[in-house]
Image: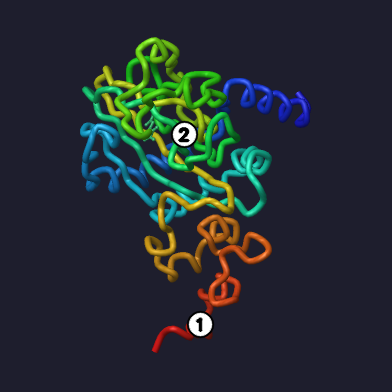
Amino acid sequence: MTSSRRDQTWREAYDSNGYVVVEGLLNEDELEEVRDALAPLLAQGPSGRNDFEGTGTQRVYTLVARGKVFEALVEHPSVLSMIDELLLPNYLLTASQAIAIAPGESPQPAHSDDAFYTIPRPRPAVSISTMWAIDDFTEANGATEVIAGSHGWTEEQLGNLYGRDGSDGLAPHRQAGLRPLIMPAGSCAVFAGTLVHRGGANRSSSVRRAISNQYCEPWARTQENFFLAVPGEKVVHMSPRVQAMLGYSIHPPFMGQVTARHPLKTLTADFENPLEG
Ligand SMILES: O=C(O)CCC(=O)C(=O)O
């Protein structure tokens, strides 16, 4: 298939279903590298604090800054070539986390990832989520479940979806539309921030590991505050693309400026902050 035909195919699927799964983005060696880097983080990581995080689910936030291998996933060329089409130039990373669903975990409340942007629906997604399968996603082990086409739902169709005012969950007749994203390890699902989905129940005997990087429009507030979370000494060693996605960039004409200067200047030795000292 030519690349333009392939591009057209993913875009058609994404536009009509609100998601697309790309298989085979990581080979076995790359997967092993990711798993090795995740192991010590998951060994320390606490379980989720509520039903949404999942009390049987471990989450490691700000993953992008916890190893070069995670940084590489954030700027994986195949994924970014899709995000480049879906968001404005200068888009940002809004969240970066590992999600490990343990055996026995119940399903997460169904939700959409950019629900906190309270622009009435239907509307374009303000953020795009990715879900990397680090283990095979199966029917039984807590594969992410999605409702195809729900990215186009109206406010009325969403009803009391989790995260909305007075919410108590997705109406039972709508829950019937949830389908697991069965995909082999090394695949990545790319889906609209408006798509209704949830982490599935893990009825298997092993942990389901995933990595979710999410990207948002350059004018939107990010979920994670990377300026405070990631020390400048670490940012200096990141690639220009990742630095830009962490907010060390300008969305023209001047969103992101630091006392009227480019935010990258804050990383240089001779930067002087007029508010310090
Ligand atoms: O772990 C998953 O499959 C989905 C998690 C999710 O959607 C979330 O935490 O926002």
Type of amino acid under label 2:
Met
Quarter of image, ligand 1: top left
Q: Closer to the N terminus: mark 1 or mark 2?
A: 2
Where does label 1 land, which residue?
A: 269
**Residue 196 location (% of width, % of height):** 45, 25
Nearer to us in this view, 83 or 261:
261
Check disc 1 and give the amino acid type: Ala
Q: Locate residue 205, reporting x and y percent.
A: 24, 21
The scheme the figure's colours follow is rainbow
Q: Residue at x 47, y 22 (%)?
A: 156
CB under 8 Å between callouts 1 and 2? Answer: no
User: Disc 1 to disc 2, how far (Cα)?
Assistant: 37 Å
Residue 238 visible to an observer of this rendering: yes
**Quarter that holds the C terminus:** bottom left
Displayed quadrant of residue 43: top left
Disc number placed over residue 102 in the picture, else none? none
The location of residue 75, given as percent across then percent down, is 56, 48
Residue 223: x and y in percent read: 42, 49
Residue at (58% x, 33% y) in the render? 123
Q: Is residue 24 left or right of residue 252?
A: left
Quick check: 256 above or below 213? below
Q: Is residue 69 visible?
A: no
Residue in the foreground of this view, choosing between 89 and 36: 89
Q: Please give the label number shown on residue 131.
A: 2
Q: Give the farthest residue toward the bottom.
A: 277
Ligand 1 within 8 A of label 2's CB? Answer: yes
